[in-house]
Image: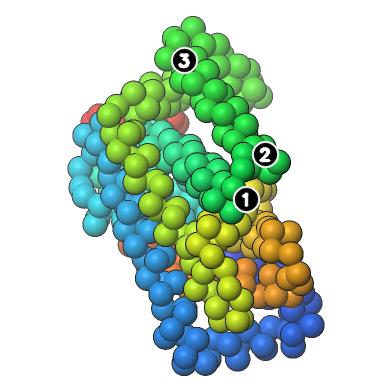
Amino acid sequence: MRARTYYIIGIVSLILIIIWLHIALLPIGGIFAIVAILTNPTNVIVWILPAFALFGLAYILRAVRWWVLLRPFKTKGNPANQFPMLVGGIFLTYVAPLRAGDLATPYWLREKQGTRFTAGLASIVWARVLDFAALILIVIVSGFLIFGTLTGQVLGYLVSGIVVAVAFVIFFILIRNDRFVGLMSRIAGRLFKPSERLKDEVPSFVENFAIDLRTDIGSRNSGWAFLLSVPIWMLETAKLVFIAQIFGQLVTLQQSMFILGISYMTGHLLAILLPAGISIFITQTAAITLALQGWGIAAAASIALIDALVYIISLTILGAPSISTMGRGYRELQDVEEVTVLEDKEDG
């Protein structure tokens, strides 16, 4: 799809969010009550600006982490000039379904800095794995601090974390096995059998991606990237502490990390089908309502809305210009290029 199509999807998504919110917030006056809150100078200066500051710090660390993950591929550039590509991709993921930004980011990286598409994609995929690992750790630790025990809900999240860790270890072992990679490439080729061109190209793409992914996983940089992932998500999940104060609600740091950790994990899984902005808002509203007993859906949706607006405003300011700086961007994705040609461009 062309870039214009994604902007249209983003606008339609925003309209649907506003309609849904107005209905959900009718008990407190609808969407107009939020407008009154946002136009109050005290709320903006004392509570909303700190939330923006936490968001900004988190995304600076994200850029540094991506630069670290790209180091094994000898990628040119630094966190500063890679920042527009990273934020532009996240912006697209937030407003468009099918995690469009996760494909756009490595494409832009290839166009601007000559890094193989599969290498850039591997770095993005590995970053998402580290995100989930960090969120699981945050949920377990914050849950233990809240409940003071490893029984019930906290034990369930601990077991989930162990299952995910075991699954990752198995995956790491398999992806380093050439026979397994060969099998997956043949399966991929058969899935695309109706297209003779893709039938020939997809297996080589899968093999190149597997090689690049295990290169990133097997490097020391992965350890540093994980250490950066934890503070990234601590900063992002701490925003709820400030936002809740706008509504006169006291939320501790542990509660903030526990609630948003759950909602972000679930929301990013749903983002495969929905724009991440919508899916995270829905899961966040549900998590706040269920975890903080006594809060009605209107109060929970209001707090989730402010958190979403911090994202939307920040990503619009940073993401939309970033997309325009990418030059040809998605217009070139309209051109049917063979995967082998995509890879040969960097080698030529």
Q: Mark 2 points at which residue?
A: 151
Give the numbered dot on residue 67.
none
Amino acid on which disc 2 is placed = Thr
Q: Mark 1 points at which residue?
A: 147
Q: What is the CA distance from the residue labelled 1 to the residue labelled 2? A: 9 Å
**Horizontal arrangement in the rendering, residue 289 relative to residue 191 (left or right):** right
Front-lying residue, 300 or 112 = 300
Quadrant in which the C terminus is drawn: top left
| Contact? badges 1 and 2 (CB < 8 Å) | yes
Q: Is residue 105 above or below residue 173?
A: below
Instruction: Write the residue at 50% across / 86% down.
Output: 43
Q: Earlier in the sequence, mark 3 or mark 1?
A: 1
Residue farthest toward the top in the current orientation of the protein: 179
Relative to 344, is 229 on the left or the right? Answer: right
In front here: 192 or 265? 265
Q: Residue 10: image x %, image y %?
A: 58, 65
Helix, strand or loop at mark 3: helix
Disc 1, SS:
helix
Give the residue drawn at x 37%, y 27%: 217
In the image shown, does 175 or 37 lie closer to the viewer?
37
Disc nearer the start of the sequence (3/2)? 2
Residue in view at x 67 percent, y 88 percent: 32
Residue indicated by mark 3:
173
Amino acid beneath label 3: Ile
- Residue drawn where x is 43% and y is 35% of the image: 126
Q: What residue type is labelled 1?
A: Phe
Which quadrant of the view contains residue 340? top left
Pointer 1 local density, CA inside 10 Å: few below 14, some 14–19, many at least 20: few
Q: Residue 128, position in %: x, y?
A: 48, 41
